[in-house]
Image (cartoon, rainbow, N blue to C red):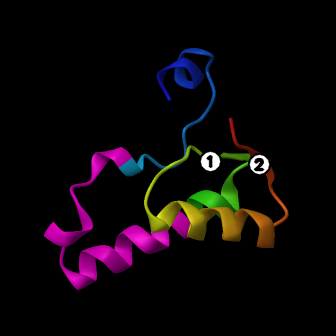
């Protein structure tokens, strides 16, 4: 993330800024889900880092559905 930012790339959505989903209210989780959806939808490329939680697979699925470029190192 920091390397991309230093290369003046736009980081659309930072999932690391949030606590564990277990600590969030339902309304907060809905807002996070919307931001993740918008982030994938508006991205030029989606970088998938694994292994992660189940949300990573959801974002990968959205990237496939939106026909986004994907990078999975």
Q: To which residue does mark 2 refer?
A: 70
At a point 34% along the width and 45% down the height, the residue shown is: 16
Residue numbers of the magenta segment? 16-37
Left or right: 68, with 7 as reference point: right
Using the rendered view, name the quadrant where residue 39 is placed.
bottom right
48 vs 45, nearest the viewer: 48
Q: Residues within 10 Å of mark 1 (few under 14, many from 20)?
A: some
- Which image quarter: residue 59? bottom right
Assess whether mark 2 and mark 1 are in contact (beta carbons under 8 angstroms): yes
Residue 9 x/y as whole percent: 63, 28
| Nearest the eye: 56 or 65 | 56
Residue drawn at x 26%, y 82% as measured from the top left: 27
Q: Determine whether, in the image, residue 25 is placed left or right of residue 12.
A: left
> Which residue is under mark 1?
48
Disc 1, SS: loop
Q: Where, quadrant-wise, is the C terminus in this rendering?
A: top right
Query: Whole-percent x and y of residue 72?
Result: 70, 42
């Amino acid at each position: 993330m920091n390397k991309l930012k230093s290369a003046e790339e736009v980081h659309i959505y930072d999932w690391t800024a949030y606590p564990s989903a277990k600590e969030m209210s339902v309304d907060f989780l809905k807002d996070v889900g919307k931001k993740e959806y918008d982030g994938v939808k508006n991205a030029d490329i989606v970088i998938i880092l694994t292994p992660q939680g189940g949300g990573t697979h959801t974002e990968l699925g959205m990237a496939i559905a939106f026909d986004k470029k994907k990078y999975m190192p």
